[in-house]
Amino acid sequence: MTILHIDSSISGDASVSRTLTKSIVESLGGDVIYRDLAAAPLSHLTERGQDPELLDEFLVADTVVIGAPMYNFTVPSQLKAWIDRILVAGKTFRYTENGPEGLANGKRVIIALTRGGFYGEGSPAAPLEHLESYLRGVFNFMGIEPEFVAADGLAISPEQRELSVNSALGETLRLAA
Ligand SMILES: Cc1cc2nc3c(=O)[nH]c(=O)nc-3n(C[C@H](O)[C@H](O)[C@H](O)COP(=O)(O)O)c2cc1C
């Protein structure tokens, strides 16, 4: 099994999303291709077009594990730059007479979300949740139903942080089982 492991947090060893993706990848086992989008950032997309190496890495992976912290209500721009390389018409989706069709189905995508606050349905901040909803939309568009593990409320209090991290870590083991 080939696993593509992507991290995007700027917080190094203190990062919760990095801890979660590491746990998932270690539990799954397999050949791992690792991309640290904070240590080696991709440039913004330009008209010169796509990056075949990044697209191929995504296409050959059986499983993709992504660390996605919430920055200003959505994905880090580092992760957005990677998404800009894998959403490619004719490769991962196409437009048909019946609307868009995903071409990347058959791949397992597991996403570790981390958020400082809470964005559940009905909560005051719910309208600002553009992380999980965006990523679900992006992968659905390519024909993939992503699986999520989330550590929320990380900035609320040390107690809440510990609770959320431990619960999400437990969830990573369940996902990888
Ligand atoms: C630049 C920056 C922006 C952030 N923006 C948000 C935000 O909009 N909403 C939120 O709930 N948390 C926000 N946070 C908190 C992070 O989501 C939280 O610290 C999380 O743990 C980051 O993931 P990491 O531990 O993997 O780095 C932000 C953190 C940083 C560093």
Image: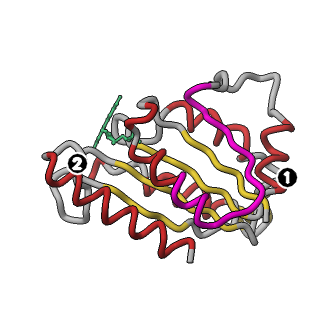
Does the beta carbon at disc 1 come under 8 Å from ligand 1? Answer: no
Crowd tier of the residue under label 2, counting other residues whose Cα lies within 10 Å: few below 14, some 14–19, many 20 or above: some
> Which residue corresponds to the image point at 57% horizontal and 37% vertical from the top-left?
80
Q: Position of residue 6 (x, y in %)?
A: 62, 45
In-front residue for pair 91/22: 22
> Which residue corresponds to the image point at 31% horizontal and 56% vertical from the top-left?
165
Crowd tier of the residue under label 1, counting other residues whose Cα lies within 10 Å: few below 14, some 14–19, many 20 or above: few
Q: Verify whether residue 162 appears in magenta.
A: no
Q: Is residue 116 left or right of residue 134?
A: left
Q: Verify whether residue 37 appears in magenta.
A: yes
Q: Position of residue 71 (x, y in %)?
A: 38, 36
Specify which label sits upstream in the sequence, 2 or 1.
1
| Image position of 57 with respect to 146: above or below | above
Judging by the rendered image, the residue that carries numbered circle 1 is 90
Q: Is residue 10 left or right of residue 96?
A: left
Q: Position of residue 119 (x, y in %)?
A: 26, 55
Does the beta carbon at disc 2 come under 8 Å from ligand 1? Answer: yes
Q: Position of residue 67 (x, y in %)?
A: 51, 48
| Image position of 103 with respect to 117: above or below | below
In-front residue for pair 158/67: 158
Q: Is residue 137 left or right of residue 169?
A: right
Judging by the rendered image, the residue that carries numbered circle 2 is 117
Mark 1 residue element: loop
The answer to whether marks 2 and 1 mark residues whose Cβ atoms lie closer than 8 Å is: no
Q: Quadrant of the N terminus?
A: bottom right
Mark 2 residue element: loop
> Which residue corresponds to the image point at 56% horizontal and 31% vertical from the top-left?
78
Alpha carbons under labels 2 and 1: distance apart = 38 Å
Q: Which residues are magenta?
A: 22-39
> At label 1, which amino acid type do we have?
Gly
Any part of residue 65 in sight:
yes
> Which residue corresponds to the image point at 33% horizontal and 56% vertical from the top-left?
151
